[in-house]
Image (tube, rainbow, N blue to C red):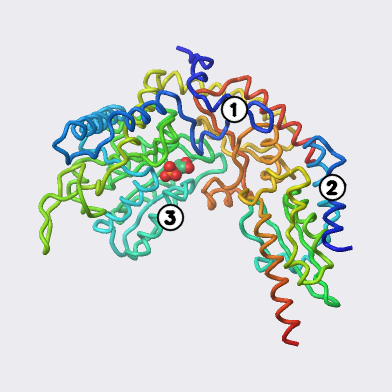
Amino acid sequence: MTIQEKSQSVIDEFSMYDDWMDKYAYLIELGKDVPLIDEKFKTNQYLISGCQSRVWLHAKMKDGLILLSADSDAVITKGIASLLIRVLSGQTPKDILESDLDFLKQIGLQEHLSPTRANGLTSMIKQIQLYARAFLLKSQKL
Amino acid sequence: MTLDTQKIRADFPILSTKVNGKPLVYFDNGATTQKPLQVIHRITKYYEEENSNVHRGVHHLSQVATDKYENARTYIAGFINAQSEKEIIFTRGTTESINLMATVLESWVFANEEVLVTAMEHHSNLVPWQQLCKRQKAKLKIIPVSQQGEIDLDLFKEMLSPKVKLLALTHISNVLGTINPVKEMIEVAHNYGIPVLVDGAQAIAHTKIDVQDLNCEFYTFSAHKAYGPMGIGVLFGKETWLKRLPPYQFGGEMIDQVGYEDSTFNTLPYKYEAGTPNVAGVLGMEAALRYIENQGIDNIKKHEDHLLEYATSLLEEIDGIRIVGTAKEKTAVLSFVINGIHPYDIGTILDQMGIAIRTGNHCAQPLVESFGLPGTIRASFGLYNTIEEVDVFFAALLRAIEMLR
Ligand SMILES: Cc1ncc(COP(=O)(O)O)c(C=O)c1O
């Protein structure tokens, strides 16, 4: 699936819930499915700053696609990481860099997922883009 | 006398806002308090009717502004019972007051000497001293705090020596709510000739401040934590000290005679007030402190103690809760963690229910880490909070826990 298609499926899933409480409960559920980062990467090097809770994010390249994994000690943050990974993991660096991530605004948690909150969302996105850029440069050099 | 909270709440327009469709419950007073109409109107009136630069004009408005500004200084001196208005320096707030002191005390703290702070300081009363000590090659020593959140007075006394050049400590902890025995500690420090700076950021709105009774050399606070505007605060300093310490910033207002080669400096308090001051802020601060005085600080304290006691008794019943800070003398601040749940998750869900609390390390990272915690959840009360709000908070908290467990 493309980023566009995956985003749409996330939007569709969240649209099933009207109540914010159910939306959060679902976000927390999604967190439980996050591809967990290998324990050995749970170090400062993979720690994302700008968040009250700790989030670790790891990226690797396989067959031209970026594979992401993460973990957090807060379940909501983990849910947010899981959302991003669900849409962006398994995509090419180029597609990641060109994506607009508009789906975050459309799932009905926009106030909570706004970039000025200390939820690490912005830092996570920046970090993923940084990985994508680095992998892209590397692949161009080869 | 008991506070009439319904009447008080009508003075604070923001308290009737809705957050996420729910009535706002504002329990983040430790971070900043809301402002009553009396303060808002005072600031507006200044800009509508009195605005002019102070201490310089020959014209009518300048005289009006100067009079109001200096009257505010006199009132504020009285509010904390300073000996004279020369001891009241207007700053941007607690942080600037402490930085001012940590800069000018370069002429007092030298290599191999010591500065004492407690383990429960806000970063604003820790980092400036840490950096001063680094610059001067002096040593910063930390007075230990028990798991209950109390200063160990015996250990404190053992740390005193002629090498110690300053004791800087908070009056009330913003994380633990502990009211420190500052008066007693100041007395002991004085036996060694050690001057004391008290960080009163969390005290000014919650307990009576009498700087002569405390006998501290320096006292600092911010207006915004006492129902006043942001960007204005006070450094109180004993005249004898402020007189002999060097100036901090240089420029207009703080000078006496200026030549191209050299200058002489103005008398107190102007020596420490370089540039055009925040006149509207000062007048707003005066209005805020008058508001507190009208309600009666003892009534306020009683009311907040009641809220704290009631909230504590409810929370203690929660399975897996740990109240952080259980000092005997405590006020207005209730920090806690829930076993197995990150504070951030609780804060996020409470916010959805219209409840404003704070989570994290509350700018006291070393303290929170020493308790082995990733942060705490903090409810902090003000004079307009009610028992009903505590009930709403408690119910919301139970709901959040249920969802997150
Ligand atoms: C104990 C304490 N000290 C200092 C400060 C800093 O105050 P301000 O940010 O107003 O300068 C605070 C504010 O959070 C505080 O709680």
Image mark for residue B127: 3
Which quarter of the rendered picture does the N terminus of chain A lie within? bottom right
- The spot of residue B266 in percent (x, y) is 15, 47
User: Residue beneath label 2, please?
Assistant: A29
Disc nearest the viewer among 3 and 1: 1
Give the position of the C terminus of chain A as an image quadrant: bottom right
B225 on left or right of B367:
left
The number of callouts visible is 3
Taking the spot 67% from the left edge, 45% from the top edge, the residue there is B344
Residues at marks 3 and 1, CA–CA distance in whole angstroms: 37 Å
Q: Which chain carries label 3?
A: B
User: For the residue labelled by badge 1, is the local secondary structure a helix, a strand or a loop?
Assistant: loop
The reply to the same-chain question for discs 3 and 2 is no
The answer for how far apart the CA atoms under marks 3 and 2 are is: 41 Å
**Coordinates of residue A97 in the picture (x, y in percent):** 72, 68
Structural crowding at the residue carrying mark 1, measured as other residues with C-alpha within 10 Å and reported as few (<14), some (14–19) or many (≥20): few
Chain hosting mark 2: A
Which kind of residue does numbered mark 2 sit on?
A: Glu
Position of A88 relative to B29 (above/below): below
Q: Which quadrant of the picture is home to ligand 1? A: top left
Left or right position of A101 against A63: left
* Badge 1: chain ID: B
Amino acid marked by disc 3 = Val
Callout 2 secondary element: helix
Q: Which of A103 and B335 is in front in this view?
A: A103
